[in-house]
């Protein structure tokens, strides 16, 4: 076929494919692959009409081959583009080759079907297709593409979920590599890396803590890491509980996430799901909604196993400074972790280690987030000023981030002004995040707290401490 005719066929195919996918998506978002059939028919019919316009004989194999190859290439390239833009295809690695092969064969089916309907007229009556025809078709195709762009298309999730059971929780999650995988009745942190992200900074996280009901608008501030701000909120229903879904976005609009927070009074827990996924916003939100649709909390499953596992917690090995003694108040120690008290009321506390790499050790964690975490955890009632960061390295080569914070305690009716150093580090040998803090009434030199916490060790062979809950024998 002449090049102008092939150009017109290509333009018609592209316009029909995009419009077909967008149009089908309005009715059935999961059936956008029908757009490939629509485009193949439109392109094949256009090619057959153009051929019969100038010739009454059967189309040669070379003409069918040229049209088939052109449309097959466009099926793969345009189909991949629409998949990237709005996830038009469920499995591109499967559907794009199928669409390309089927589109390639379309001319051998369409040309014979349309041959009986060819016009019986003089061959000289039809002027040849030229640049003017191509230009007019290009303008029409551009109009069709603009119209298709404004068609409201619901988001589509291409992520396959598999049901997972955790203590008191059932949820559908993708089978991705787990950066964090810890679950008990008291605390849970499941973080899965999105394999579609080249930079490796996209993830899906499911977390919960044992806590009284919280206000979602306040709680979301403690999980909005990485410079994301809340742009929109909506009411959701998760496992028969009212929830709030937040849409978060960076100032440059290049990074986005969705977070849903809800309270489960039956299990005395606060749960949240964070989707910071690769791909367009619509597909990310569709995946997020798909996960929430399958959540079932307070299931009652695995509670006995979780209760038994909760008595085994991991702490760093630690030789306290001179004058410090282990806290003997069993209830206080159990609630706070490992507690050491100094001669002048100083306190050194180590919380149970968190499996995996916690987001709190990331470099993009802001002082404001640290302040919110301390008040959210109930360690401080109020933070005064902005926490300041000091970075040190221990003898095992781990980078430890130390936040110096001033504020007021929330443990007594008469609030006391305190200063504390919050030390957080990730231990690659044990794949755990350790947290310790040093606190005194009034102000002190930050180096005092750093020197007190730095001798703690998370892996030193058999000296690692893997103990029962504090206060037990």
Image (cartoon, helix red, strand yellow):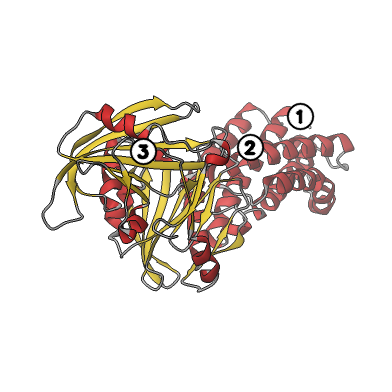
- Identify residue for label 2: 11
Of the numbered discs in the image, which one, if any, rests on residue 154? none
Whichever of labels 2 and 3 marks the residue nearer the N terminus, that label is: 2
Local packing at callout 3 (Cα closer than 10 Å; few below 14, some 14-19, many 20+) is: some
Residue at 85%, 50% (x, y): give it: 112
Q: Do the residues labelled 1 and 2 touch (CB within 8 Å)?
A: no
Q: Whole-percent x and y of residue 12?
A: 64, 41
Q: What element carries label 2?
A: helix
The answer to whether residue 154 shows anywhere in this view is: no
Asked whether 415 or 260 is in front, the reply is 415
Location of mark 3 (residue): 320
Residue at position x 82%, y 46% in the image: 105
The quarter of the image holding the C terminus is: bottom left
- The answer to whether 466 is drawn above or below residue 132 in the figure is below
> How many badges with numbers are in the image?
3
Q: Distance between the residues labelled 1 and 2?
A: 15 Å
Residue closest to the far left: 414
Residue behind mark 1: 2
40 or 118, which is in the foreground? 40
Q: Which of 272 and 463 is in front in this view?
A: 463
Q: Distance between the residues labelled 2 and 3?
A: 75 Å
Point out residue 28 in the picture as x, y percentages from the top left corner.
57, 61
- Image location (x, y in percent) of residue 208: 42, 58
Q: Distance between the residues labelled 1 and 3?
A: 86 Å
The local secondary structure at tag 3 comes to loop
Question: Mark 1 Cα within 10 Å, few/some/many (few <14, many 20+)?
Answer: few
């Amino acid at each position: 076929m002449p090049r102008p005719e092939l150009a017109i066929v290509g333009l018609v195919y592209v316009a029909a494919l995009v419009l077909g996918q967008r149009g089908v998506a309005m009715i059935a978002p999961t059936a956008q692959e029908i757009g490939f059939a629509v485009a193949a028919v439109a392109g094949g019919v256009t090619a057959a009409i153009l051929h019969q316009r100038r010739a009454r004989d059967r189309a040669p194999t070379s003409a069918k081959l040229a049209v088939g190859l052109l449309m097959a290439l466009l099926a793969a390239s345009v189909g991949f583009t629409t998949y990237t833009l709005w996830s038009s295809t469920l499995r591109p690695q499967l559907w794009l080759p199928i669409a390309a092969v089927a589109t390639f064969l379309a001319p051998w089916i369409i040309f014979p079907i349309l041959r009986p309907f060819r016009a019986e007229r003089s061959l000289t009556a039809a002027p040849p297709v030229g640049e003017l025809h191509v230009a007019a078709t290009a303008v029409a195709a551009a109009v069709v593409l603009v119209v298709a762009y404004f068609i409201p298309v619901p988001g589509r999730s291409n992520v396959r979920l598999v049901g997972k059971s955790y203590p008191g929780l059932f949820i559908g999650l993708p089978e991705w590599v787990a950066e964090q995988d810890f679950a008990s009745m008291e605390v849970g942190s499941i973080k899965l890396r999105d394999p579609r992200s080249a930079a490796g900074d996209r993830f899906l996280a499911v977390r919960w803590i044992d806590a009284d009901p919280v206000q979602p608008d306040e709680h979301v501030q403690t999980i909005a890491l990485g410079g994301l701000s809340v742009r929109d909120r909506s009411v959701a229903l998760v496992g028969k509980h009212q929830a709030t879904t937040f849409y978060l976005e960076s100032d440059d609009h290049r990074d986005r996430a969705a977070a849903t927070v809800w309270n489960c009074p039956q299990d005395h827990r606060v749960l949240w799901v964070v989707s910071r996924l690769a791909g367009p916003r619509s597909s990310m939100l569709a995946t997020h909604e798909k996960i929430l649709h399958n959540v079932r909390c307070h299931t009652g499953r695995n509670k006995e196993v979780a209760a038994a596992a909760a008595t085994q917690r991991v702490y760093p090995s630690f030789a306290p400074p001179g004058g410090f003694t282990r806290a003997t108040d069993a209830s206080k120690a159990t609630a706070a972790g490992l507690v050491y008290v100094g001669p002048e009321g100083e306190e050194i506390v180590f919380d149970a280690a968190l499996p995996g790499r916690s987001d709190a050790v990331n470099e993009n964690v802001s002082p404001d987030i640290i302040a919110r975490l301390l008040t959210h955890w109930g360690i401080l009632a109020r933070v005064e000023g902005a926490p300041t960061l000091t970075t040190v390295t221990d003898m095992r080569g781990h980078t430890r981030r130390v936040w110096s914070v001033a504020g007021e305690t929330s443990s007594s009716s008469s609030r006391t002004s305190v200063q504390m150093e919050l030390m957080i580090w990730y231990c690659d040998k044990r794949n755990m995040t350790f947290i310790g803090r040093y606190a005194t009434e009034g102000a002190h030199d930050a180096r005092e707290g750093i020197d007190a916490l730095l001798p703690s060790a998370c892996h030193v062979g058999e000296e690692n401490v893997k103990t029962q809950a504090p206060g037990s024998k």
